[in-house]
Amino acid sequence: MIDLRSDTITKPTKEMREAMFLAEVGDDVYGEDPTIIKLEETAAKILGKEAALFVTSGTQGNQIAVLTHCRQGDEIILDEDSHIVFYEGGAISAFAGVQPRTIKSENGMLDPKKLEEAIRTNDIHFPDTTLICLENTHNRSGGAVIPPSHMKKLFDVATEKKIPIHLDGARLFNSAVALNLPLTEFTQYTTTVQICLSKGLGAPVGSILAGPKEFIEKARKWRKRLGGGLRQVGILGAAGFVALTEMVDRLAIDHENAKILADGLDKHPLISVINKVETNIVLIDITKTGKRSDKFIEALKQIGILAVPFGPKTIRFTTHYDVSKENIKETVNKVLNLK
């Protein structure tokens, strides 16, 4: 099978496995795991933040951020198609007791004017707006990159209103590579940021939450409350360190493969690529095939290709470390012959 369902399905590299085997470990709940300490300090430096915290997943990182920033009964503003709203099981309401105030974006880019209008005034009838959440790259828009210039406009609004910004940067490295910019060009316009080590960077487990030192100290307690206080977790952190320090530049290969895939699939008379392919995600519309997504996914599976539905008539393909250029060309040839 050529597995294009997600960049989360990658297997750890040989270097990661060796690093995991040899990892120096200690009890991280006591703050004594040297590998995790090294990972967190390195991540904080790369992200331009005072401190960082290793968490088990991107979702956990986002939820810890909301729990740390907000109180029960608060309101947070975010894109209606954001991962936090769409794919995290209503956790912000279930755990933090906050309600989302959603705005429709244009390829993940919130309108600064709409953002300002959505911020609640000091009225007894309204919840307090205590957090703004952004996402970069924007998953539902097909891996769209939100440039730092646009993030600054939103950050300026937030700063004026004294509201923190949390960035769900699960694929932020993809944005940085796509624009050939350091991560700090993006994160300077955030209060806190979450990045995934287990997507394009290929680690088997883990994400990083970074921000001010005092914030991370509070976040560490929320991680414990959520059952995320792990012991000799340096075994996992070692793979994350390899991901963070050795797997970033190669994301350009995934982006190139995604463009090859998009150009090829777009030649099918019944298929249309519907996103601007900036990173490693390709979305296709299959309306003209007369099939629903589930039936089309099954047809792909029969010819040795795995993808995921992204709506009743939309399919998502994601390129990653475990898919070669030859795999991409094979995928194109098979899909072009698909009736």
Image (cartoon, rainbow, N blue to C red):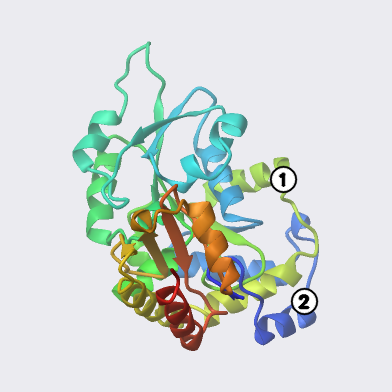
Q: Which residue is mark 1?
A: 224
Quarter of the picture holding the N terminus: bottom right
The crowd level at tag 2 (other Cα within 10 Å; few <14, some 14-19, many 20+) is some
The crowd level at tag 1 (other Cα within 10 Å; few <14, some 14-19, many 20+) is few
In the image, is 149 to the left or to the right of 4?
Answer: left
Residue 190 visible in rendering: yes
In the image, is 204 to the left or to the right of 280?
Answer: right
Quarter of the picture holding the C terminus: bottom left
Q: Residue 198 in the image: x percent, y percent?
A: 59, 66
Q: Which residue is mark 2?
A: 24
Q: Residue 321 in the image: x percent, y percent?
A: 54, 79
Q: Residue furthest left?
A: 113
**Quarter of the view holding residue 159:** top left
Dot 2 falls on a residue whose secondary structure is: loop
Q: Amino acid at mark 2?
A: Glu
Dot 1 falls on a residue whose secondary structure is: helix
Q: Residue at x 58, y 67 (%)?
A: 301
Q: Amino acid at mark 1?
A: Lys
